[in-house]
Amino acid sequence: MDQTTSPSFTVEYIESPPAAEPMPDEFATHRVRRSVLILAAVVLAVVVVVTLLPGLGSVRNTFKGARPGWLVAAGALQLLSCLSYVLVFRGVFCRVMRWVTSYEIATAELAANSLLSVGGAGGLALGAWILRRGGLAGAEIARRTVAFFLLTSVANFVAAIVVGIALAIGLLDSNLSPAAGLVPAAGAAAVMALVPLARPAATRLARRSQHRRLSAALESVAGGVDEAIVLLRSRSLLVLGGSFGYMLFDVASLWVCFKAFGLPLPAGGVVLLAYLIGQLGGLIPIPGGIGGIDGGLIGTLVLYGIGATQATVAVLAYRALALWLPLALGVPSMVSLRRRLRREEHDIKACAPGDEVDVIGRGRVPAAALGR
């Protein structure tokens, strides 16, 4: 009796690739449009208040004396601050991606900071999503983000120490007491001294933690501190120049705004110190930091001996530039990045440790080795 062998079939189940991580809700197109409208409405309300509120006649009269040439100069300085942010972003995250990619990610972060001002966290969250969507591992992004935050803060702390001491010992022309310089200098020095200690503390806590996410976050802090120290010791021009340029050009923009309205120029060091303290108002989660940063800057400038009318006019003009210029640069970058990421037309994955790129004269070189 013949045996009939029935054909056998092998069914293979091909696992489809995981869906791409969607953009965070707060950066969806309709949310961005709404945030821009809210920001515009708040700015309009400030304009109406300044224009109509009794008792602000001196402020209105000062605004009428605007000098367009100096306002353009203040805007140019603000643009240089934004470009400096691009430099430090590239120096920390990846030097092998194309410059246009570095520019688009960094300016998109700046635009996000204008829309969602929470001490820069909004921009960092958007940047992290872009890098993850581009193929960079989450742990690598977290480590570099910690380093980036520390390195963009180090210029502020160093400036606070140097200017605070100079003010206290009388090197700056000011009628302020030595405490006005020593207190912020001591606070900045204390924070800088604590940063290296965060590494062993975070490592110990990560080993003891029973929560996976908390442990991963603490490991990122430890790794980020190490990364920041390595980059500082390397004396990278991108990192150091970008970090100090980002802060100093921004302060210079504020300083020039006094000149733009024919106001007496205060000492640059005093403006710098008041700026560093007043920027803490940006921690208040208000769109664009309106009210928080403005109030903090005006209040600190007045505390440091600058007239209330002068401080108000200069700060409002500076804040208009600091809000809208990053938006003008960053919103188109957001649109372009979303299109390129959707089509996989990006070069972010080359920044992952272990990936190799062709370098003329060196052959195949690990990308991580070029990013330092």
Image (cartoon, rainbow, N blue to C red):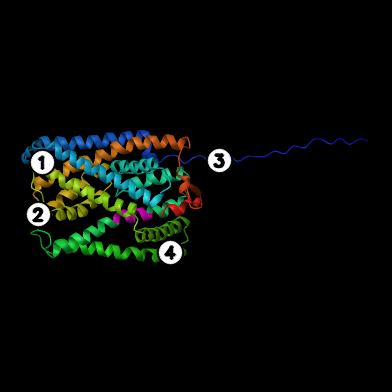
Res 202 label: none
Classify residue 217 by image quadrant. bottom left
- Residue 353 percent across, percent down from the top left: 48, 52
Residue at the disc numbered 2: 305
Q: CA distance from mark 4 to mark 1?
A: 52 Å
Q: Secondary structure at mark 4?
A: helix
- Residue drawn at x 33%, y 54% is 237
Front residue of 260/276: it is 260
Res 17 label: 3
Q: CA distance from mark 2 to mark 4?
A: 45 Å
Q: Residues within 10 Å of mark 4 (few under 14, many from 20)?
A: some
Q: Is residue 352 above or below residue 229?
A: above
Q: Mark 3 belongs to which amino acid?
A: Pro
Q: Are marks 4 and 3 in contact (CB under 8 Å)?
A: no
Which badge, 4 or 3, is on the more N-terminal residue? Answer: 3
Our reading of the magenta stretch's main secondary structure is helix
Q: Nearer the viewer, mark 1 or mark 2?
A: 1
Q: Mark 2 belongs to which amino acid?
A: Gly
Q: Secondary structure at mark 1?
A: loop
Q: CA distance from mark 3 to mark 2?
A: 61 Å
Q: Which residues are magenta?
A: 146-153
Residue at the disc numbered 4: 203
Q: Residues within 10 Å of mark 2 (few under 14, many from 20)?
A: some
Which badge, 1 or 2, is on the more N-terminal residue? Answer: 1
- Residue drawn at x 12%, y 62% is 171
Q: Mark 4 belongs to which amino acid?
A: Thr
